[in-house]
Amino acid sequence: NAGVMQNPRHLVRRRGQEARLRCSPVKGHSHVYWYRQLPEEGLKFMVYLQKENIIDESGMPKERFSAEFPKEGPSILRIQQVVRGDSAAYFCASSPRTSSSYNSPLHFGNGTRLTVT
Amino acid sequence: QQQVKQSPQSLIVQKGGISIINCAYENTAFDYFPWYQQFPGKGPALLIAIRPDVSEKKEGRFTISFNKSAKQFSLHIMDSQPGDSATYFCAATVNQAGTALIFGKGTTLSVSS
């Protein structure tokens, strides 16, 4: 019973390149969340998606960042023209289709560590 | 109003001691308060959670105390062990399907043997 799978675990990009982070949720989960973690900053909510829909993107930077969760395949967080300030750990979490937070907590992946050189 | 403030930032406790981490929130609509534990190189994992209709919840050595009027909640780790050394995050949200968790900044706990 696989948990949330994120890949790659580590990603190095030069300034100006694109970064694509993938997340496969727990089987049967159709809610996906992306969080960014910076040292001493905790986990910052970025975006919440359901299959084929962006539900809440209030935490996403307005430019260069986008996310999708297609009908088939993993959720993708895409960062265009990366800058050094994008270096961080990016975590994906999933939860079941219909559930309250209390009954079905978020399951996190082990993250992708992005380093921009 | 969406913030969750966590303290201390770091904590050193001797083996067998009690570790206490505190959190405060402003949004009175929050009604679900989980704590997550994170080891280096891993993602956060749910440790224990509480709803505001109870003042305390205990699971093994881990206890959440909740003070609704003060809008504060805390994690107590009894008989702290070196294996408890990790980063702990408090969080809060409105308990409905899909609402995102708002996390505190984390507390790095070191338990010395």
Image: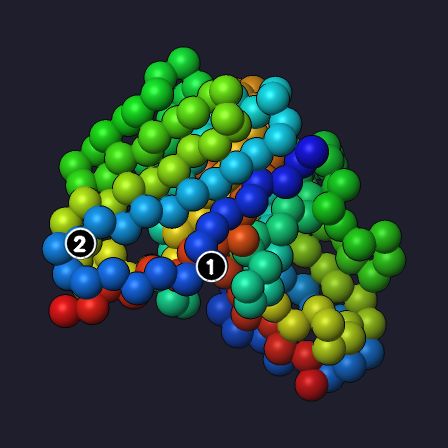
Q: Quadrant of residue A49?
A: top right
Q: Residue at x 69, y 44 (%)?
A: A47
Element carrying mark 2: loop
B14 is higher (above) or lower (below) than A95 = below
Q: Residue at x 54, y 53 (%)?
A: B105
Determine crowd level at label 1: few under 14, some 14-19, many 20+ residues with C-alpha closer than 10 A: some
Task: Find the residue positioned furthest to the front.
Answer: B70
Task: Find the residue positioned furthest to the right.
Answer: A63
Q: Residue at x 62, y 61 (%)?
A: A21
Q: Amino acid at mark 2?
A: Gly
Q: Residue at x 14, y 49 (%)?
A: B79
Q: Earlier in the sequence, mark 2 or mark 1?
A: 1
Q: Which residue is mark 2?
A: B17
Q: Which residue is mark 1?
A: B9
Determine crowd level at label 2: few under 14, some 14-19, many 20+ residues with C-alpha closer than 10 A: some
Question: Which of the two residues, A87 or B78, is positioned nearer the viewer here?
Answer: B78
Horizontal relation, residue B78 to residue B68: left or right: left
Question: Horizontal and vertical percent for residue B113?
Answer: 14, 69
Q: Chain of mark 2?
A: B
Q: Quadrant of residue B109?
A: bottom left
Q: Chain of mark 1?
A: B
Element carrying mark 1: loop
Question: Which of the two residues, B3 or A74, is positioned nearer the viewer here?
Answer: B3
Question: Horizontal and vertical percent for residue B37?
Answer: 36, 50
Question: Which of the two residues, B54 or A48, is positioned nearer the viewer here?
Answer: B54
Q: Amino acid at mark 1?
A: Gln
